[in-house]
Amino acid sequence: SGINTKNEVLMKKAYGIVVYESISDEAKLQAYVELAPKAFDKDGAKFLTRGYPSVLKENARNERTVVVEFPSVEQAEAFYESDEYQLALEALGDGAVRSYKVCEAF
């Protein structure tokens, strides 16, 4: 966080990064994809990328990857814990193995 000229605390943006290690049920993934955006609307989230990598380097794997920008780490956490997103996660269930991380902007 920093201070602007009006002495207000500035929140650093945060990025939610989801990597799908495997997808075993496309129907469950589709149900998740239909529900998840409803949660994004209320927490100031902005999709930056969603899909498969265009280029693979070093030890990278061709895994579905999603990057979402949030106004802050706190809002990223609020999004994840929201009833709307939990409903989407329930729909996904065991249809995919994923890692989900939130990183604060540098």
Image (cartoon, rainbow, N blue to C red):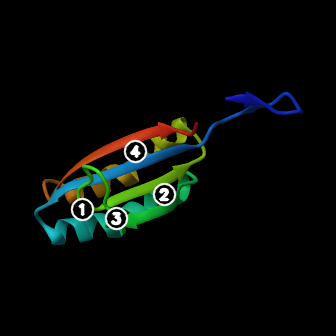
48 sits left or right of 24 in the view: right
Badge 3 or badge 1: first in the primary sequence: 3
Badge 2 or badge 3: first in the primary sequence: 2
Q: Residue at x 53, y 55 (%)?
A: 45
Type of residue at label 3? Pro
Counting other residues with Cα less than 10 Å from the Cα at mark 3, is it few (<14), some (14-19), or many (20 or more)?
some
Looking at the rendered image, the disc whose residue lies closer to the viewer, 2 or 3, is 3
Type of residue at label 4? Tyr
Read off the residue under disc 1: 62
> Distance between the Cα atoms at labels 4 and 1?
25 Å
Judging depth in this view, the residue of 35 and 46 nearest the camera is: 46
Read off the residue under disc 2: 40
Type of residue at label 2? Phe
Q: Quadrant for residue 42, please give it.
A: bottom right
- Does residue 35 lie above or below 16 as drawn? below
3 sits left or right of 40 in the view: right
Q: Position of residue 72 (x, y in %)?
A: 58, 40
Read off the residue under disc 4: 80
> Distance between the Cα atoms at labels 2 and 4?
9 Å
